[in-house]
Image (spheres, rainbow, N blue to C red):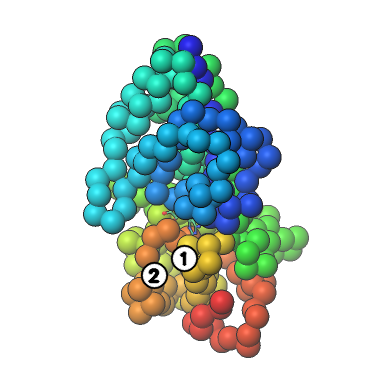
């Protein structure tokens, strides 16, 4: 029997990885990885693992979750040391539960190695805290890929003493801003959008809440991108004297 290590690859910059993750990646026979795993990280691997891509990008279909689970199980049963490498932290919006179920069902030994989630990585890169005494006492990580609008209690989210971070929110920006404003947040409440955070091509744009969707369209922001809503955003470290709505490099 082999084993499977479910590992967080961090938000993009290859060094944002734990020592344990890096050791296991270099010991693996097989690495099953997603679109969000940085190519630079993969290029630096010193072992000679077989690389299996299961993400979707550039028009290709991704493997289904069932196919991914089956790839993990089949290789482990054959005695291979498999690393399942996911962007950010596998414990955050990483479909970890389904993969754990598949491994447990077949009694396959596994470990989980947490990674730096995009919310932390991007905030670090832009120099602002996710919580701050007197400004934000709570942090919420929210997937924007909910199937029904009523799954979200917007009035509960529309608070001025916390930080909201929407993952997978680019296509839902108009709805997020209108719902939060309807629920009580000011139209000029601070928002920061970060595309490709911690990568060389990182872009970050401040916008008032009401303008969020228009800003995304005007700047052609694409996934992967995060939407931060909260007062901590005003603490971004500006390298230039940029105004609200201007680009921060
Ligand atoms: N497990 C990952 C999240 C996977 S969901 C984590 O912990 O970060 C995929 C979403 O994460 C993307 O659509 C985007 O919203 C966000 N994301 C991941 N990497 C990102 C990055 N480098 N910059 C901005 N957003 C990112």
Question: Which residue is identified by label 2?
Answer: 221
Q: In this view, does 98 lie above or below 140?
A: above
What quarter of the picture does the C terminus occupy? bottom right
Location of residue 25 in the rendering, given as x and y in whole percent from the top left corner? 56, 36
Question: Residue drawn at (53%, 16%), measured in percent from left and top?
Answer: 109
Q: Does the residue labelled 2 lie within 8 Å of ligand 1?
A: no
The residue at 48%/62% (across/down) is 196
- Residue 195's disc number: 1
Residue 120, quarter of the rendered image: bottom right
| 39 in relation to 110, above or below | below
Task: Find residue 153 and report its horizontal and vertical position in percent.
Answer: 43, 50
Q: Residues within 10 Å of mark 1 (few under 14, many from 20)?
A: many
Q: Give the Cα separation between the discs numbered 1 and 2.
A: 7 Å
Circle 2 sits in a helix, a strand or a loop, which is it?
A: loop
Q: Is mark 1 within 8 Å of ligand 1?
A: yes
Q: Which residue is the extreme one toward the right?
A: 133
| Residue 28 shows in the view | yes
């Amino acid at each position: 029997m082999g084993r499977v290590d479910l590992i967080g690859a961090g938000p993009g910059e290859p060094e944002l990885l734990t020592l344990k993750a890096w050791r296991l990646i270099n010991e693996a026979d097989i690495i099953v990885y997603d679109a969000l795993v940085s190519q630079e990280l993969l290029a630096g691997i010193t072992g000679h693992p077989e690389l299996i891509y299961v993400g979707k990008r550039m028009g290709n279909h991704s493997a289904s979750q069932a196919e991914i689970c089956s790839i993990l199980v089949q290789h482990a049963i054959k005695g291979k040391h498999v690393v399942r490498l996911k962007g950010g932290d596998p414990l955050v919006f990483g479909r970890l539960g389904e993969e754990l179920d598949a491994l447990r069902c077949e009694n396959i030994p596994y470990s989980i190695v947490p990674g730096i989630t995009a919310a932390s990585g991007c905030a670090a890169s832009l120099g602002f805290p996710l919580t701050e005494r007197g400004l934000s006492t709570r942090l919420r990580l929210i997937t924007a890929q909910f199937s029904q609008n009523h799954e979200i209690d917007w009035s509960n989210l529309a608070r001025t003493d916390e930080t909201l971070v929407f993952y997978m929110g680019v296509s839902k920006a108009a709805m997020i801003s209108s719902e939060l404003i309807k629920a009580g947040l000011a139209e000029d409440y601070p928002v920061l959008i970060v595309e490709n955070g911690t990568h060389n091509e990182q872009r970050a744009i401040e916008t008032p809440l009401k303008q969020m969707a228009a800003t995304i369209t005007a700047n052609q922001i694409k996934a992967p991108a995060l939407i931060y809503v909260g007062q901590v955003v005003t603490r971004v470290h500006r390298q230039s004297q940029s105004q609200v709505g201007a680009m921060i490099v």
